Image: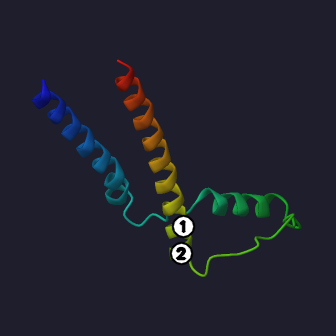
């Protein structure tokens, strides 16, 4: 039974890795910009005199720092969710 679980987990890991890198090979020269950039472009096309309601308090010094902070936020969120799910499962197993 354990060998089957290991094989299934390995297949799932390989699929996740494939899903992560496949877009980089399919769209070689594509620009992977965020939804904020697309929204700004669309708004400026629709209403040329649009002025934002507020400005950010702090802007990261570069796009790399912004990406780092976004990845850190995602990792912390995923870590919290993983910890919580593991905690709940461990609590349930301890009650058995």
Residue at horizontal 57%, vertical 80%? 62
Question: Label 2: which residue?
Answer: 65
Where's residue 84, x and y in %?
47, 39
Above/below status of 79 relative to 48: above
| Residue 5 image position (x, y, % from top left) | 18, 30
Q: Is residue 32 visible?
A: no
* Circle 2 SS class: helix
Residue 23 quadrant: bottom left
- x 13%, y 29%: residue: 2
Residue 29 image position (x, y, % from top left): 41, 67
Label pair 2/1, CB-CB below 8 angstroms: yes
Q: Secondary structure at mark 1?
A: helix
Residue found at x 26% / y 38%: 12
- Binning the other alpha carbons within 10 Å of mark 1 as few (below 14), some (14 to 19) or many (20 upward) gives few
Residue 96 located left or right of residue 35: left
Q: Is residue 26 visible?
A: yes
């Amino acid at each position: 039974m354990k060998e089957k679980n290991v094989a299934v987990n390995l297949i799932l890991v390989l699929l996740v890795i494939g899903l992560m890198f496949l877009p980089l090979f399919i769209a070689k020269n594509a620009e992977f910009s965020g939804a904020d950039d697309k929204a700004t472009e669309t708004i400026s096309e629709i209403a040329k005199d649009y002025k934002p309601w507020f400005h950010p308090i702090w802007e990261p010094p570069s796009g790399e720092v912004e990406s780092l902070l976004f990845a850190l936020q995602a990792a912390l969120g995923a870590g919290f969710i993983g910890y919580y799910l593991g905690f709940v499962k461990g609590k349930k197993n301890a009650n058995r």
